[in-house]
Image (cartoon, helix red, strand yellow):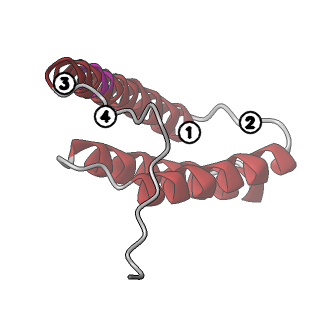
Amino acid sequence: MLRNKGESEQIKLYEEMLAIAQKQEKVLQEEDVDEERLTALIDKRQEIIKKLEALGEIIRSDKILQLMTQIKDLDQNNEVMLRQGMDEIRKKMVEVQQNKKANRAYEPEMRAHDGVFVDFSG
């Protein structure tokens, strides 16, 4: 049974935060992560955190603690996926840089030593 209205408000906000964490997980599992969508979810979550802070003290009911644990577990998994994605991007960037170096080695830059003027007028 809920102790008061504050507890029910906190439960509602934590349930929203859990739903957002689940959406973040789905976005991070996509092959091409939609950065805009991920940022929007993070922004929504930040709004919820502000609302929770405005309510004051966190009520430590079993339901709230359960929700907090679920959110924490999802956050940890999401962080791992995010870090793996960032590592993959870094590896691709290194590969691109190496390919650029290789291309430059086989295709020297064309440099003009003296200026040349060509008059096509006549």
Indicate the position of residue 94 as horizontal and vertical percent values. Answer: 28, 19
* Distance CA(mark 1)–CA(mark 3): 52 Å
Residue position marked by numbered label 3 in the rendering: 99
At a point 45% along the width and 36% down the height, the residue shown is 71
Mark 4 nearby-residue class (10 Å; few <14, some 14–19, many ≥20): few
Q: Quadrant of the C terminus?
A: bottom left
Indicate the position of residue 73 as horizontal and vertical percent values. Answer: 38, 26
Residue position marked by numbered label 4 in the rendering: 110
Do callouts 3 and 4 mark residues in contact (Cβ within 8 Å)? no
* Distance CA(mark 2)–CA(mark 3): 54 Å
Q: Nearer the viewer, mark 1 or mark 4?
A: 4
N-terminal of the two: label 2 or label 3? Answer: 2
Residue position marked by numbered label 1 in the rendering: 64
Q: Amino acid at mark 1?
A: Ile
N-terminal of the two: label 4 or label 2? Answer: 2
Indicate the position of residue 42 as horizontal and vertical percent values. Answer: 55, 49
Q: Nearer the viewer, mark 3 or mark 4?
A: 4
Do callouts 1 and 2 mark residues in contact (Cβ within 8 Å)? yes
- Could you say which is closer to the camera, residue 39 or residue 99? 99
Residue 103, by quadrant, is top left
Q: Amino acid at mark 3?
A: Asn
Residue 35 among magenta residues = no
Provide the residue span drawn in magenta: 90-94
Residue position marked by numbered label 2 in the rendering: 58
